[in-house]
């Protein structure tokens, strides 16, 4: 079960649609996942920057490391008819995956740290192979991705591995590569809820084992901590726990549809945030002052600016008038920012109407000049169909990661067969986008 950074620094191949935002009960379900729930809970404004505005985050080295380990384990287990790969073949797969990006693209500060992590990954895989080689067997499902529509949501889960226990029961295995393992109840609940509603799982069981089951039930979920080879087992959650969790999911979805994206500043979420330069909380500072960090209400009560207690967290000390002024200033700036964004979108649309042809067009004002151009956009809606084309033409390794730039690059790659390009195009939608390059004129 991956929290896709990709979740990465490149655009997602299958972008989330938000057509139903603001339309309760609208025809288009809201695309959702555990990762999205987690981010909205952490900070609604961060959710908006990432999933609505689609602003790229900086690459994270731990994501690159974890992804490479996952790919190597997928290579090891993806065998329907043994023998399984040797350790040398597994390490070669890891090496190839690791070399797809430079140390900078992977988010490392220097090549020495990247090399250290590579060697750590090699030793980790050797230990995993030695511990599991004698018990390897063809898995039920690997890297299983599914979308299930429920309660106005289209929820996606991606399971690292699923094993069939018989009688309609399945076990979900999630590989963890971080320093430690923490139980993540929301992830467990989300995967249980969606797996047990997924009609495709019943079809897969029938195809593989010839058993027609009326329902699928989670027997247990397993976190496999690859660095220590420890396994953490979690039993199926009760209906009451799932019900309480799902109420929170629906509440978050309702807020997203209602465009409620207020910032939720705090020491942890702000320290690791890539969007601080866009956040109104940090308009005058690159990092949050300790006195303004808002803690979750359940952690502790703090003295308020008026000398009493508040359940909302720590508030800057000062007079009541100062607090009122800051609140009003924040509200005013937020309203102005929304107005400016709307105006900017409108002007961009008008400028776009002035350039409908190919190539570039330069326009000039008194203080600024800009260059307009039309770029090509591709979107691919059917993930399984695209993977099928890649596998048919032995191109999956070439597009490893399934990122949009890699797929689009194939469409103009002379080494890719025309038949493959045509099939990929049939599963995609081409459009154009307006690109504006603005320059300020030098005052004479």
Image (cartoon, grey):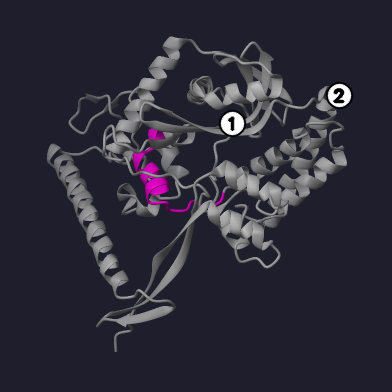
* Residue located 29% across and 75% down the image: 354
Q: Which percent across, then down, holds residue 96?
A: 76, 51
- The correct choice, above or below, for 411 with respect to 251 in the image is below
What residue does disc 1 label? Answer: 1
**Secondary structure category for the residue under label 2:** helix
Res 21 seen here? yes
Judge the density around disc 1: few (<14), some (14-19), many (≥20) Cα neighbours within 10 Å: many
Majority secondary structure in the magenta region: helix
- The correct choice, above or below, for 378 with respect to 131 in the image is below
* Residue located 87% across and 37% down the image: 86
Q: Which percent across, then down, holds residue 90?
A: 81, 41
Q: How many marks?
A: 2
Q: Nearer the viewer, residue 210 or 263?
A: 210
Cα gap from disc 2 to disc 1, whole angstroms: 25 Å
Quadrant for the C terminus in the image: bottom left
* Residue located 87% across and 42% down the image: 88
Q: Is residue 133 left or right of residue 46?
A: right
What residue does disc 2 label? Answer: 134
Q: Is residue 43 magenta?
A: yes
Judge the density around disc 2: few (<14), some (14-19), many (≥20) Cα neighbours within 10 Å: few
Q: Nearer the viewer, residue 112 or 125?
A: 125
The stretch of residues the image draws in magenta is 40-59
Res 222 seen here? no
Res 21 quadrant in image: top left
Q: Is residue 356 left or right of residue 10?
A: left
């Amino acid at each position: 079960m991956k929290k896709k950074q990709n979740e990465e620094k490149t655009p997602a191949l299958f972008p989330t649609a938000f057509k139903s935002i603001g339309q309760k009960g609208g025809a288009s379900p809201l695309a959702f996942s555990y990762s999205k729930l987690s981010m909205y809970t952490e900070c609604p404004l961060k959710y908006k920057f990432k999933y609505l505005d689609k602003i790229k985050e900086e690459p994270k080295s731990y994501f690159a490391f974890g992804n490479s380990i996952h790919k190597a384990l997928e290579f090891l287990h993806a065998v329907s008819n043994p023998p399984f790969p040797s350790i040398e073949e597994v390490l070669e797969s890891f090496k190839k995956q690791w070399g797809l990006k430079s140390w900078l693209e992977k988010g490392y500060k220097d090549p020495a740290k990247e090399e250290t992590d590579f060697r750590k990954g090699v030793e980790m895989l050797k230990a995993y192979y030695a511990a599991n080689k004698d018990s390897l067997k063809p898995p039920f499902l690997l890297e299983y991705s599914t979308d299930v529509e429920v309660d106005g949501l289209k929820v996606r889960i991606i399971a690292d591995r699923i094993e069939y226990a018989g009688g309609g029961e399945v076990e979900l295995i999630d590989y963890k590569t971080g320093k430690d393992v923490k139980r993540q109840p929301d992830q467990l609940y989300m995967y249980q809820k969606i797996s047990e509603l997924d009609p495709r799982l019943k079809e897969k069981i029938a195809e593989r084992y010839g058993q027609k089951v009326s329902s699928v039930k989670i027997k247990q979920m397993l976190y496999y901590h690859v660095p220590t080879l420890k396994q953490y087992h979690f039993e199926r959650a009760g209906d009451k726990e799932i019900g309480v969790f799902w109420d929170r999911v629906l509440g978050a979805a309702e807020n997203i549809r209602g465009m409620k994206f207020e910032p939720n500043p705090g020491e942890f979420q702000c320290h690791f945030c890539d969007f601080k330069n866009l956040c109104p909380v940090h308009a005058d500072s690159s990092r949050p002052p300790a006195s303004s960090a808002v803690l979750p209400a359940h952690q502790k009560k703090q003295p308020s600016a008026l000398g009493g207690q508040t359940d909302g967290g720590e508030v800057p000390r000062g007079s009541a008038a100062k607090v009122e002024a800051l609140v009003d200033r924040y509200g005013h700036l937020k309203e102005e920012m929304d107005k400016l964004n709307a105006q900017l979108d409108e002007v961009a649309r008008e400028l776009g109407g002035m350039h409908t042809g190919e190539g570039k067009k330069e326009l000039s004002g008194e203080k600024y000049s800009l260059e307009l151009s039309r770029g090509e956009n591709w979107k691919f809606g059917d993930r399984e169909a695209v993977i099928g084309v890649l596998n048919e033409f032995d191109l999956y390794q070439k597009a490893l990661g399934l990122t949009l730039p890699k797929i689009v690059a194939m469409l103009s790659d002379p080494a890719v067969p025309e038949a493959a390009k045509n099939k990929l195009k049939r599963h995609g939608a081409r459009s154009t986008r307006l690109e504006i390059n603005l320059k300020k004129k030098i005052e004479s």
